[in-house]
Image (cartoon, helix red, strand yellow):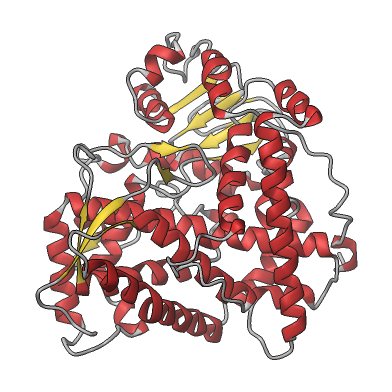
Amino acid sequence: MTEENLMFDAGDRNWQSGVDWQLVSTVSLSLLLATADGENDVGFPVCITSSWSKDFDNLCDWYTHLLQKSRTQTIHIHVLGNTITANPSNVEHILKTRFDNYPKGEPFSMILGDLLGHGIFNVDGNLWRFQRKMASLELGSVFVRSSAFDKVATEIKTRLIPLLYSVAGKNEGVLDLQDVFRRFSFDNICKFSFGLDPGCLELTLPISHFAHSFDLATKLSAERAMAASQWIWKIKRVLNIGSERKLKEAIHQINILAKEVIKQRRKLGFSTNQDLLSRFVAITDNESYLRDIVISFILAGRDTVASALTSFFWLLANHSEVELKIRDELDQRIQENQDFATLEQIRHLHYLHASISESMRLYPPIQFDSKFAQEDDTLPDGTFVKKGTRVTYHPYAMGRMEAIWGPDFMEFKPERWLKSGTFCPQCPYKYPVFQAGIRVCLGKELALVEMKSVAVAVLRRFEIKVDRVGYAAIRFEPGLTATMKGGLPVVVKERSTHAGP
């Protein structure tokens, strides 16, 4: 297929719409699970209001509870036509063995279409293959990876560390670490992908309209998927009311900035710049298509990294013994008078790597992912999947399955990733945090280097303590990525002995 065949009029879209969270709570959730019967299901009817909202902080915990009780780690929600699994054999079947039978599917393309358009996270087939090939050419380059590390290091040195020092210098200085990491990762993904610097980590400035609109649009788009009836979406969208009006306004702001990004890159020129956007601009001038590429890059590099870092530092604040072991490793690997760790040093921080992996086992940035069966199929555990069924694998629940991780599955235990002190990766089908198989995350290594770089720089210089009484459990906001409700307020204090300025 030629590149021209892959182009399209991305401005001609006919997407469906969704509902707001309160309406989901009162209407959709009461219908969510009618019964759970059959050989592979939990085997008893469940009332959503008593089994979820009363007994669990998060919907993902309720799903986990049901999957833990299932003999096959698979359940079926009849009202939504959704088969949900935490079975590694099923995950391998979906993501590898029968990959072509489980695309994203038209229903989700419509749900996320207003926001993501025809970007890589919302398409299948040749369009997906083309975008993935273009991205892999860039991300696979040794030069690009080295350049990405330099950009991350610069952002840490010139903005993140000075910001934390300024807060630590105040008496009991408090800040929202989740907000800081979102700003940090937003700056990084824009510099890496577009060659532009939005300067979001300057806390003296309000977060950009784009970032705020992006947060709102991802939240409202995710809520669409929770609706029991698509008619509610369509009516609200046609009438331009409620959450659909807010979503439309948010996407309008997103479109303005995305077009500005493309405009600025064209002004600067592309011939000598190493960024992802340049590769796509070189083959098309379709503004709507390029807009979709811009939004997809931001979704990939901003929210996921920020989510993973937020959960990681929350866990460290509650597990001082792990933090001490990380500090010991840093002291052994990095010289005391060394300002910043090198890329080679960061790659050899095995206990830190294990700690971050363990954190994402318990709190994956993407809690679940859904596909749609194109044809009838039978999963390895014997579950029959009818054509058109939504099939969801659940990384959040998989990290909490005794059958996968043993009786200590709820413990934050980095040692489970180590063998004789060396990091040993787990099977990606039992740990699909970065997906697996053909759709495995292209930016996995870049994301890990970014997270480890932040952890090294912060832990060598600061003490981070959660500033909330009784903050013993995480509560999540609805969204495409895991977001802590209320953020992560922390007290930042400078360490008595630390390296670097």
Can residue 307 be seen here? yes
Q: Quadrant of the N terminus?
A: bottom right
Q: Is residue 47 left or right of residue 271?
A: left
Q: Is residue 174 left or right of residue 172?
A: right
**Position of residue 432 measured from the top left corner of the image (x, y, whole percent):** 45, 49
Task: Say which of 15 and 184 sits in front.
Answer: 184
User: Where 368 falls versus 207 (above or below)?
Assistant: above
- At horizontal 10% and vertical 77% (from top left) the residue drawn is 497
Q: Nearer the viewer, residue 157 or 204?
A: 204
* The C terminus, quarter of image: bottom left
Q: Picture quarter containing residue 68?
A: top left
In the figure, is residue 100 to the left or right of 430?
right
- Residue 448 position, x and y percent, is 40, 67
Task: Please state which of residues 62 and 16 is positioned toward the viewer in this rendering.
Answer: 16
Residue 109, given in percent of the width and then of the height, sits at 72, 42
Q: Looking at the image, how many numbered discs can be counted on the residues?
A: 0
* Residue at (64% x, 78% y) in the render: 275
Q: Is residue 478 left or right of residue 339?
A: right
Q: Position of residue 303 (x, y in %)?
A: 50, 55
Q: Nearer the viewer, residue 334 or 133?
A: 334
The residue positioned 49% from the left and 47% from the top of the image is: 481
Q: Toward which corner of the image does residue 383 lie, by quadrant? A: top right
Q: Work out whether residue 444 can be spotted.
A: no
